[in-house]
Image (cartoon, rainbow, N blue to C red):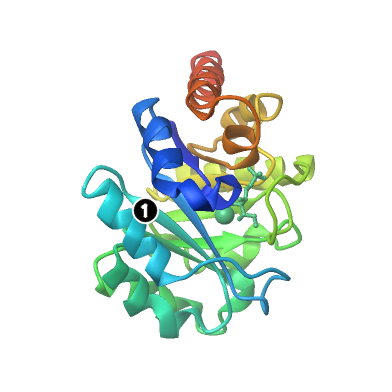
Amino acid sequence: MIELAPSILSADFTHLAEQVQPVLDAGATLLHVDVMDGHFVPNITIGPPVVAALRKHVASKIPLDVHLMIENADNFIPAFVDAGANWISVHQEACVHLDRVVQHIRSRGALAGVVINPATPVATLTDILEVVDYVLVMSVNPGFGGQKFIPRTLGKIRDLAELRAQRHLSFRIEVDGGIALDTIESVVQAGAEILVAGNAIFGRGEAAQNVQQLLHAARSATLRKA
Ligand code: DX5
Ligand code: ZN
């Protein structure tokens, strides 16, 4: 099932609640929250208090998909789960004990995802695919919204979809970075099902209308694929 996950990184933080409601009403079924620490990535964003505020605002209406671009992610998992994170993803590149971190996330009752940067091969995930709920393929280098989509990441989405079928696994495939009307069809055709978009939703025009157009383009691409 195709799902659109608006990234609040490009929203107006002084009006977060008002920014989020229309995208939910327009059909977004996940909310993507980008957490950056200024170490793993060259930018600092938000932490558990903002997740808790979002959880309070959206109540039980929508899962919060928390993308941790931080070092020592293991130490922060309890705080994010307590704040209301439903999905938590960590970077392969940032976790020495990736299996332990994934088990930790699942033991706290959240869905666990592993993220790979554009230069990280899918092969680094061979031994974790069985125990993850989703894999997030970065289609830009993490750290900032509004960057240009890197087309060679499409091959990794295809490879993951193929591996999943070959090994009869059930992880879902998410893509993040530069997703807009001109790139959404290619990622869906490659096999992505959870589509993160920040700038294409909050960066221009009406957010609700942008959600509808992106979902329409993604669903048309699914029909053509089938
Ligand atoms: C980048 C973040 C993304 C970002 C996507 O490091 O992980 O989630 O917000 O933004 P756009 O859609 O603008 O590329
Ligand atoms: Zn993200």
Q: Residue at x 55, y 45 (%)?
A: 11
Estimate how packed mark 1 is, as few (under 14), some (14 to 19) or many (20 or more) residues with alpha carbons within 10 Å. many
Which of the 4 image quarters holds residue 198? top right
- The relative height of residue 73 versus residue 209 in the rendered view (above or below) is below
Q: Residue at x 38, y 27 (%)?
A: 27
Left or right: residue 154 compared with residue 170: right
- The relative height of residue 62 versus residue 183 in the rendered view (above or below) is below
Q: Residue 79: x and y, percent? A: 34, 77
- The relative height of residue 143 versus residue 39 in the rendered view (above or below) is above
Quick one: quadrant of the N terminus?
top left
Q: Residue 44: x and y, percent? A: 63, 70
Left or right: residue 224 compared with residue 56: right
Front residue of this view, candidates 37 and 182: 37
Residue type of the residue flagged with mark 1? Leu
Front residue of this view, candidates 80 and 97: 80
Assess mark 1: CB under 8 A from ligand 2? no
Front residue of this view, candidates 114 and 165: 114
Front residue of this view, candidates 41 and 11: 11
Residue 1 visible in this rendered orientation of the protein: no
Location of mark 1 (residue): 64
Circle 1 SS class: strand
Q: Residue at x 38, y 76 (%)?
A: 77
Q: Residue 13: x and y, percent? A: 52, 52
Which of the 4 image quarters holds residue 50? bottom left
Q: Residue furthest front?
A: 14
Residue 145 visible in this rendered orientation of the protein: yes
Q: Residue 52: x and y, percent? A: 32, 64
